[in-house]
Amino acid sequence: MSLLKVNDLSIEYDVPGTEPVKAVHHVNFDLEQGEFVGLVGESGSGKSTLGFALTRLSKPPARISGGQVLFNGKDITTLSDEELRVQRQGGFAMVLQSGMNALNPVRTIRNHFMDIFKAHGHVAKDKREGRALELIRKVGLPDRTLERYPGELSGGMRQRVAIALALSLDPKLMVFDEPTTALDVLVQHEVMNTIRELQASEGFTAILISHDLGIVLESTTRVMVMHNGVIVEDAPSGQILRAPKDDYTKMLLSHYGDPRAERVSVPGLDRKGTYDPNATPTEADKAMTLTVTGVSKVYKGRKRGDKPVTATNNVSFTLHPGESLALVGASGSGKSTIAKMITGIEQPTKGEISLGDKRIDRMKSKRDLRDLHSDIQMVFQDPYAALNPLHTVEYTLMRPILNYTGLRGAAARNRMLELLETVGLTPVEQFAAKLPHQLSGGQRQRVVIARALASNPKVLIADEPVSMLDMTLRAGVLALLDDLRVRLNVSMLYITHDLLSARLITDRIMVLNQGTVVERGDTAQVLQHPHDDYTIRLLNAIPKLETRSDDHAAVHA
């Protein structure tokens, strides 16, 4: 008998005043004990909705409208809350997308374990401390982690804690919902290694939900591809990679590229032009050139007795109008600190930062900083957090127009509509009236870009602008940023841990490791022929379009 059998499952979202939204349509599949299966698809495909239903974690307005979810022969869709609580111990668990959001920020990690042990009563009181230590060690974390609060842990550590908490119920089935989203490539690699090792050693059945087909193919032996609420393809990983049958699967595969390859391209993204370093700069260009010279930033220790922390160490670069520079490195490498200093949020401990003849590192007055923020704007990582859910798109864009341009009335509104046209959100009047929750992730990020353009900036700092978007949305946003760079002659500092996107849209690259520049040069040259061991590690951590069976074959060849 199958561990999990899904029969004709359909899920709807009940939206007051409108027809129910059908999210999952008549899904059927079986899972055997010990299988590791991938579930892939773009945002909105229904994969996370399905994952929540399989673990009975769905909340209104989501509603199972038909079908069964049989776990060990028992239909869990019919269980009461108490029956479900009992079923979870030794049954099923889910690891959510964001480790921070899944943890209580005011309780220690030890308390998280104790809460679970008390709720389910499956661990005797005198054995709870030992069991918590055992689980923390299983996911590769030090014992002292139990004393920490979630806010004291890195993103990768929080995700490992979430995995350990799920393991505490000894589940036979574990569902991982985008477990590596927004993690840098090295941490992503470590988390996936942890998941693979645990699945092999513990023997649980695993479903890995992701929009990243590379990660799924590298980790699982079977892949289900989901599109518009329907599973359009279900096959062994090797078949999905080498002989996909559905056009949608073929499209997902087409959006992958190796940043180390001689030629790299993805559908929907063609560079509009590259910066010519030999061109003679005009006086206007000189006035818009960003210069960073010997910049270091040292933070005091958080507590008395703690050593100072060097966030950046002697960083220098120049960024000309129309030029794009990638700043890459793992989390904690100093990328965001550099962005904060360029925007005047932080002052460097040493060094100089200038825009033309304006010394940013000496700016302290509100007027100077206000003028600076007109010239330098940021596009943030999370389009969901960057927009106020209560404000329309029109309101969001009108604020910087009124604050920075001097336009008023009809002229200001025309500028707002023009910005929507610029970022491809048409019909403009319709999008102007929308609230953030009425937009897709890609549309939200376009609004964030439009807001950054409202002040007519000279420099755009794009801080991980596509890390939370699926592959096709990434291509659209990256194409837009590249087009704006050329069309508006703005310079772009592109901060990322995604080396493929850096290869696709930047002229030059700087690799940061613990605040120090370890490699720099032409983007294609550096990624094709890296010299520093750290750059090589970043490249080697990128998921490859190969399957677990390929790995096993290589090992035993």
Image (cartoon, rainbow, N blue to C red):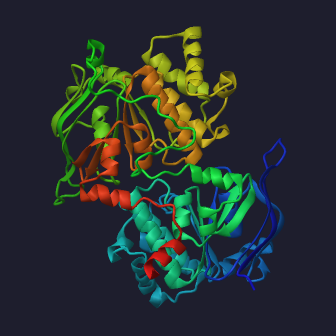
Given residues 36 and 131, the one toward you in this image is: 36
The answer to which image quadrant residue 222 occupies is bottom right
> On the rendered image, what quadrant is the N terminus found in?
bottom right
Q: Position of residue 189 (x, y in %)?
A: 42, 64
Given residues 235 and 172, the one toward you in this image is: 235
Number of disc labels: 0
The answer to which image quadrant residue 375 occupies is top left
Q: Position of residue 217 (x, y in %)?
A: 55, 65
Please determine whether, in this image, residue 65 is positioned above or below residue 547. above
Q: Position of residue 514 (x, y in %)?
A: 24, 54
Q: Is residue 193 left or right of residue 28?
A: left
Q: Which residue corresponds to the image point at 52% horizontal and 60% vertical from the top-left? A: 214
Q: Is residue 549 left or right of residue 366?
A: right
The answer to which image quadrant residue 10 occupies is bottom right
Please determine whether, in this image, residue 335 is positioned above or below residue 549. above
> On the rendered image, what quadrant is the C terminus found in?
bottom left
**Does residue 34 appear anywhere in the picture?**
yes
Q: Is residue 223 left or right of residue 466?
A: right
Q: Position of residue 458 (x, y in %)?
A: 36, 22
Q: Which residue corresponds to the image point at 49% horizontal and 63% vertical from the top-left? A: 103
**Does residue 237 appear anywhere in the picture?**
no
Please determine whether, in this image, residue 456 is positioned above or below residue 440. above
Given residues 76 and 148, the one toward you in this image is: 76
Q: Which residue corresponds to the image point at 55% horizontal and 33% vertical from the top-left? A: 446
Q: Which residue corresponds to the image point at 40% horizontal and 49% vertical from the top-left? A: 499
